[in-house]
Amino acid sequence: MKTVTIRLAGLLQSYGSEANFNYRTTLGYPSKSAVIGMIAAAFGYERDNPAINRLNNLAFAVRIDQPGRALQDFQMVHMQKGKQIQSKITYRDYLQDAVFVVAIGSEDSELIEKIQYSLRHPRFSLFLGRRANVPGGMLQTKVYEDTTPINILDSLQWQAAKWFQKKQKKQDKVQVDIVADANLLPDQRYYLQKDKVVSFSQKSRQFEFRRIAEKSIELINPQFEKLGWDTEHDIMNFL
């Protein structure tokens, strides 16, 4: 299997699963459907292109290297009903300063190469979950031969921002979570999430359930600062 990694970082990110008009929440990590949407945009697919559904077959895993902080804003929406205009407040949740590493795998080597090229030369604009959430610069991608998304995320060094790593300089290792297709983590308990793309059509957006599993791993903190010991201090000296 060939695998491409994508580092997702930006000022704001938001990945809804179950949401309604009034309150649009976010997951704590990129959903597979959001990443499929990004790949489809990079390919230049229109929302109702049936080729989008085949992207559900990609092997998918994401590592949460920097969880980010929660942010909520609200917007005032005005709707006309008959001769009256009604106003309503809607709430939206975001993740600030988050960093994720997505790994996409396939036995189709050409498809993985096409994904990497297209993400760096997209036909349509790319965004991190919502149209207003732009990536923090060009996406950092890398292709790996003969490995799976889980294997590469297990071995890849910590991708959090340097300032975030320094905040944890007293820890030589940090714990991060990996969320993946359940078949990639067969020893872990799975749960269902409505995250399989059926249609991105604005007239009828539809998603089905997919199996998801999680695990935690430890990574080395490159900003770890070992505490030194003052061996010259003599506690008995005052006697």
Image: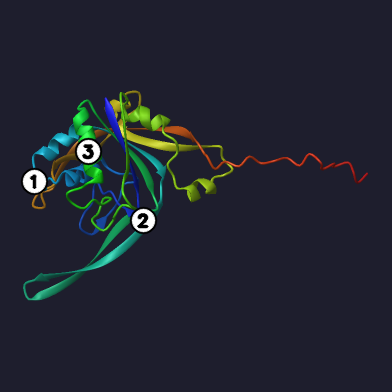
Mark yes or no: residue 204 visible: yes
Pick the residue in front: 182 or 125. 125
User: Where 119 falls versus 71 (above or below)?
Assistant: above
Q: Quadrant of the C terminus?
A: top right
Amino acid bearing label 1: Asp
Query: In front here: 146 or 60?
Result: 146
Residue at mark 2: 11
User: Residue 136 location, x and y as percent?
Assistant: 34, 53
Under circle 2, the secondary element is: loop
Query: Alpha-carbon distance for marks 3 and 1?
Result: 19 Å
User: Mark 2 or mark 3: which comes first in sequence?
Assistant: 2
Q: Earlier in the sequence, mark 1 or mark 2?
A: 2
Question: What residue would you read off at disc 3?
Answer: 115
The residue wearing badge 1 is: 48
Closer to the observer: label 2 or label 3?
3
* Farthest-out residue, bottom: 83
Which secondary structure, mark 1?
loop
Q: Position of residue 190 (x, y in %)?
A: 30, 30
Judge from the rendering whether residue 133 lies leftward or rightward of residue 99; answer left or right.
left
Classify mark 3: residues with Cα within 10 Å, few (<14), some (14-19) or many (20+).
many
What type is the residue that disc 3 sits on? Ile
| C-alpha distance separating marks 1 and 2 | 29 Å
Extreme residue in the right direction? 239
Q: Residue at x 44, y 36 (%)?
A: 157
Instruction: Give the class, few, some or many, for how many residues have Cα within 10 Å of label 2's Cα (few <14, many ≥20).
Output: some
> Residue at the spot x=21%, y=54% of the render?
20
Q: Quadrant of residue 171?
A: top right
Asked whether residue 194 appears in the rendered view, the answer is no
**What amino acid is labelled 2 in the image?**
Leu
